[in-house]
Image: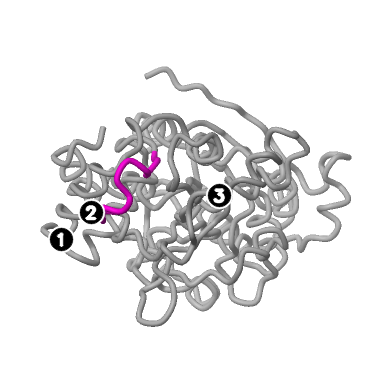
Amino acid sequence: MTTKISRRTFFVGGTALTALVVSNLPRRVSAQTRTLNLYSSRHYDTDDAIYEAFGEVNLIEASSEELIERIQSEGANSPADVLLTVDAGRLWRAEQAGLFQPVRTPKLEERIPASLRHPDGLWYGFTQRARVLYYSRDRVNPADLSTFEALAEPQWRGKILTRTSSNIYNLSLTASRIAIHGESETRRWLNGLVGNFAREPESNDTGQIRAVAAGVGDVAIANSYYFIRLQKSTDPADQEVVEKVALFFPNTGPGERGTPVNISGAGVLQNAPNREAAIEFLEHLASDEIQREFASANNEYPVVDGIPIDPVLASHGELQPDPLNVADLGRYQPDAARLMDEAGWR
């Protein structure tokens, strides 16, 4: 594989663009005394201020697969201190490759909920997103929606939209169902769900939401932040989609576990040359001010209690997250891939 990378270096208050934001963020370390080499698959320019508030950060950006391969090929001589990526399934892949070292600090264990971090401290979640449903305002009564499991019922025949089975978000969703219900029940669910697809899986999460608006199907599966992006867009076509589609949190209410959630997370790498700075960087991401900025960069939920949520996201109601440890989303991914293939989810 040819790694396509972007390299940037940040210093405290290093650019005019982010100077104002940085001035309002807590500075964790001095650029003169700490250097951090960060490998990240997050590609949000708003993260730049967070790096500048920390100190000197040498950033390598690429896809998670490219970064994992790069760290493996660099071996013991890797300059990487921290791997930051999205989805617990990708963190699990790095974990399986032996890339992380365990890290435990009182601050991280106090601030990051146990369900959003690795049980052995190999990585920690710093933002969370929900896997939710989007439905046609004209064709679906929200009272008819309830759980992901209910999407396998005959009433949804020819009405469900989703992307392919190889998509990490769908793999993690299916893995969560295995962790909760076991293989046999998940197999039955998948058979019913696939039988209810409105079309062959295609496109991305935003494409599923647009397809509901276009009448291709009635209910789509996608992450929570994609709709918020459309709501904030000034494009008339996006606003037309927003008028036709609504967001629904499945598996919530009395007696329900809660809506499946996933994370953006990071861990200290096995051969980190700047281990102390790497640990401080994780704590930096867990601080109140950084939590607010880090989550709002992608319209996600903070992981630390009490941090304000983006007002547009909050307007959809309170998230009731499933307490399942997100480490299980990686643990059961091989089983999820197998069952999805058996069910004909392509």
Q: Which mark is residue 185?
A: 1
Which secondary structure lies at badge 3? Answer: loop
Does residue 124 appear left or right of residue 343 in this picture?
right
Q: Point out the tag, 3 or 2, that comes first from the N-terminus.
A: 3
**Which residues make up the magenta segment?**
152-162
Foreground of the two, 332 or 201: 201
Q: Callout 2: 10 Å neighbours few (<14), some, many (20+)?
A: many
Q: Amino acid at mark 2?
A: Tyr
Looking at the rendered image, the disc whose residue lies closer to the viewer, 1 or 3, is 3
Mark 1 lies on a secondary structure that is helix
Spot occupied by residue 158 in the image (x, y as percentages of width and height):
32, 40
- Which mark sits nearer the N-terminus, 2 or 1? 1
Tag of residue 332: 2
Q: Which residue is mark 3?
A: 138
> Which one is closest to the eye, mark 2 or mark 1?
1
Image position, residue 134 (x, y; %): 50, 51
Q: Are marks 1 and 3 in contact (CB under 8 Å)?
A: no
